[in-house]
Image (cartoon, grey):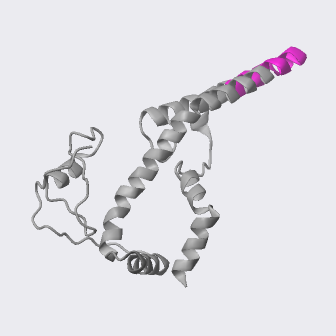
Amino acid sequence: MKKSNNNSDFRFGPFNIPNENDFVEISENVKKALSGENQESKKQKTTYSISPLATTLIKDFAEECGVTQGGIVELAPLLFRILASESLNRRQSELSSIKILIDQIINNLNTIESIAPQLKCYSDFIKKATEELFILESNAVKDKNYKGVDTSATEILSQVKNKKPVIAFHKDVEKILSKDENIESLFKTMK
């Protein structure tokens, strides 16, 4: 990654901001911001609300690290994107394990059919749904669906009612937050 020749300095100070050509996948809006295009003023205001806990954590951590609160807020989207991208990489690496598990399920269903052939039509339904699981996750990874999977193109799983969506990268957030040293550090910050 080369140092960019633009004016995109964070409040922490200048960073090794990538050139727009270094990241093929970044949005046009990010490319414009990195190149300095269409910026009426260097600083722009955004309206959003955050919880009192988040406000306190930002304030305390900024003081502890000797940086501005705005610097932490400016880095948050980049860090969140990195987290989501790493989650997608993890999901990609786990596809082979998912495939092995699905093959095992199908082999077990074949065994059930050999014992009880009258269950074959039900077993076939379960096999099809199980195969759709792998297709869903493979397509989601290929399409860079950070949130999860899209069942709309599946024959069986699209019919599941009352689906409660689970955001895929929540597993990675929980993993980070569940580390004892991170929780301990959080509570030290809050004292």
Q: Which residue is at the front of the view, 148 or 72?
A: 72
Q: Which residue is at the front of the view, 78 or 98?
A: 78
* Residue, far bottom: 191
What is the span of residues highlighted in magenta in the rendered image?
110-127
Q: Position of residue 156 (x, y in %)?
A: 61, 31
Snapshot quadrant of residue 105: top right
Q: Main secondary structure of the magenta part?
A: helix
For image coordinates 62% across by 41% down, the residue present is 160
Snapshot quadrant of residue 133: top right
Q: Is residue 143 visible?
A: yes
For image coordinates 43% across by 76% down, the residue present is 61
* Residue, far right: 115
Q: Position of residue 69 (x, y in %)?
A: 34, 76
Q: Is residue 172 left or right of residue 9?
A: right
Q: Which residue is at the front of the view, 64 or 41?
A: 64
Does the segment drawn in magenta span residue 119?
yes
Q: Position of residue 114 (x, y in %)?
A: 86, 14
Q: Is residue 151 visible?
A: no
Q: Quadrant of the N terminus?
A: top left
Does the segment drawn in magenta span residue 87?
no
Q: Which residue is at the front of the view, 23 or 16?
A: 16
Q: Is residue 170 left or right of residue 12?
A: right
For image coordinates 31% across by 65% down, the residue present is 74
Tell me: residue 31, above or below residue 155. Answer: below
